[in-house]
Image: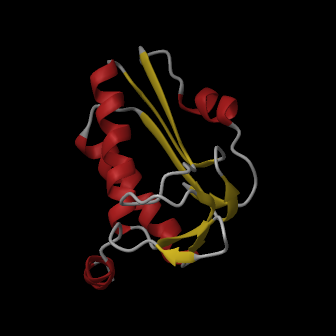
Amino acid sequence: MRLQRGAFKVDAAIRAVRRPDCGATVAYLGTVRSTPHGGGRTPVRRLEYEAFEKMAVAKLTRVRADALARFEVKELILHHRLGNFQVGEPVVMCVASAPHREAALDAVRFAIAEMKQIVPIWKKEVFRGGRQRWVVGEMRPLEVVRRSKRSR
């Protein structure tokens, strides 16, 4: 589980999770879209991602462990990029392997949703014309603080 600034190596991630006892490998790439979060008419020109990196890596590791415990998956990779990204560029990658497709699909869906809720990664939308705004509401900041205090 990691944060990175460079491009994803999707083929390497798929190779890393594949196992002979698994019949399903699911790879998800989340990309920058031109539609603003929550709707709106002004197209997004780019997204900027920042993170509290030390805590974010710990939380990504926790999400992975939770997915492995909850679903019948054998391996899972969850990576997020930091920096500035244009429309169409991938910013999040999750790859899972499992004996059956339902478990791999469910684990990826869970990991992405949980990551958006608890990992301290922040997203700023930059619109055509120069207007900017931080996206609010995906992460539950108080939940992050509560869980962090419990895990000490």
Task: Tell which of 85 and 24 is nearer to you.
Answer: 85
Residue drawn at (32%, 56%) of the image: 114
Residue 59 vs residue 137: left or right?
A: right
Q: How is the image coloured?
A: secondary structure
Q: Disc count in the image?
A: 0
Compared with 124, 34 (above or below) is above
Residue 55 vs residue 111: left or right?
A: right
Residue drawn at (51%, 22%) of the image: 19
Q: Quadrant of the N terminus?
A: bottom right
Q: Position of residue 111 (x, y in %)?
A: 37, 48
Compared with 84, 136 (above or below) is below
Q: Position of residue 149 (x, y in %)?
A: 29, 85
Residue 102 vs residue 135: left or right?
A: left
Q: Position of residue 45 (x, y in %)?
A: 65, 59
Compared with 98, 2 (above or below) is below
Residue drawn at (59%, 29%) of the image: 14
Residue drawn at (40%, 32%) of the image: 74
Q: Position of residue 2 (x, y in %)?
A: 59, 58
Task: Tell which of 19 and 128 is nearer to you.
Answer: 128
Task: Tell which of 4 and 74 is nearer to you.
Answer: 4
The outermost residue toward the right is 6
Q: Quadrant of the C terminus?
A: bottom left
